């Protein structure tokens, strides 16, 4: 089995419902420009999911959400469950984004619970990991990624792990315009794959796509995507313009 290339747009807290519909329509209209080997995903806010679902239905663009809660239902004000996402037409779900970790109390443990819950409901998790600048400067990049990865996948079978996508997002490269060099990204991602081999064996480790995320743009995507262990991108700012998003996907050719 060959590894898929997954290019996902994380729209973060951007776009009203009409704006999200407009952007989704533009992505769908230009989706043919992406190489056939690329899986395209758009991840709007929760409130836009049902409307964007109608736009992408029956196209090659899949729908993703930006988070979920690990419980089935109940008194969890403000939270969204896996079955709600499934009912809205969602296929992928971003879990453990660094903004959730930094600002909203996400831990390796909650990432693990959310990943298990997503898999239980047939959602495909995009599990985000990555080091802070201070951790990179202290020489802890690999150790941080190993800890976050092992935390996220604790108790998850190889069969389930094979359904996931990993996003390596060095926190210092997110929204800063400071993209990791191809060597920095490839080195970190090769190490992540090595940890996956340790956890699940090489067959499963070889089929899990590892995305790069952090200031990815059409002009730097090609070099990153040419690396052996970079199997797509999780795109923030550049995903808010259909042309830039598809320009990044074109870099996977
Ligand atoms: P930017 O592409 O804006 O740096 O954001 C990356 C990211 O956090 C995607 O999840």
Image (cartoon, rainbow, N blue to C red):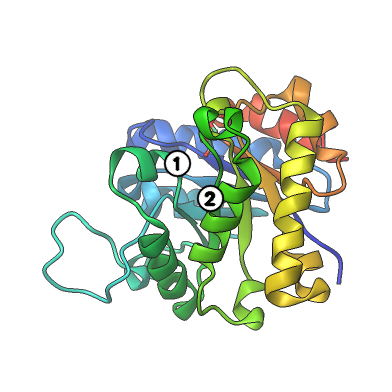
Q: As drawn, is 16 to the left or to the right of 235?
A: left
Q: As drawn, is 173 to the left or to the right of 184?
A: left
- State the image quarter where residue 233 is shown: top right
Asked whether 103 or 151 is in front, the reply is 151
Quadrant of the snapshot with the C terminus: top right
Q: Is residue 28 above or below residue 109?
A: above
Disc 1 residue lies near ligand 1 with CB under 8 A: yes
Name the spot of residue 173 as percent of width and height, x first.
58, 26
Read off the residue under disc 2. Answer: 128
Name the spot of residue 85 as percent of width and height, x first.
38, 64
The first of marks 2 and 1 along the sequence is 1
Mark 1, residues whose alpha carbon is within 10 Å: few (<14), some, or many (≥20)?
many
The residue at 60%/32% (across/down) is 136
The residue at 69%/35% (across/down) is 30
Asked whether 44 or 191 is in front, the reply is 191
Read off the residue under disc 1. Answer: 98
- State the image quarter where residue 69 is shown: bottom left
The residue at 57%/59% (across/down) is 149
Q: Quadrant of ligand 1?
A: top right
Q: Is residue 229 above or below residue 160?
A: above
The residue at 75%/33% (across/down) is 184
- State the image quarter where residue 77 is shown: bottom left
Disc 2 residue lies near ligand 1 with CB under 8 A: yes
Q: Is residue 241 visible?
A: no
> Do tag 2 and tag 1 residues touch (Cβ < 8 Å)?
yes
């Amino acid at each position: 089995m060959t590894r898929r290339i997954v290019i996902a747009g994380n729209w973060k807290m951007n776009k009203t419902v009409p704006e999200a519909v407009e952007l989704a329509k533009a992505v769908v209209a230009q989706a043919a420009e992406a190489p056939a080997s690329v899986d395209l995903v758009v991840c709007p806010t929760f409130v836009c999911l049902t409307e964007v679902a109608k736009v992408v239905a029956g196209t090659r663009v899949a729908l993703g959400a930006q988070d979920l809660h690990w419980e089935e239902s109940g008194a969890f004000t403000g939270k969204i469950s896996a079955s709600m996402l499934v009912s809205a037409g969602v296929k992928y779900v971003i879990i453990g984004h660094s903004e959730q970790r930094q600002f909203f109390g996400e831990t390796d443990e909650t990432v693990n619970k959310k990943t298990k819950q997503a898999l239980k409901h047939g959602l495909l998790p995009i599990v985000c990991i990555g080091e802070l600048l201070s951790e990179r400067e202290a020489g802890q990049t690999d150790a941080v990624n190993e800890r976050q990865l092992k935390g996220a996948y604790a108790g998850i079978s190889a069969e389930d792990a094979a359904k996931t996508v990993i996003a390596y997002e060095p926190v210092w490269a997110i929204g800063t315009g400071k993209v990791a060099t191809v060597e920095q990204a490839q080195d970190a991602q090769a190490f992540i794959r090595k940890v996956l081999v340790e956890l699940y064996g090489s067959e499963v480790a070889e089929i899990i796509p590892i995305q790069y995320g952090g200031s990815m743009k059409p002009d730097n995507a090609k070099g990153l995507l040419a690396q052996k262990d970079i199997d797509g991108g999780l795109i923030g700012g550049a995903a808010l313009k259909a042309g830039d998003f598809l320009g990044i996907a074109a870099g996977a050719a």
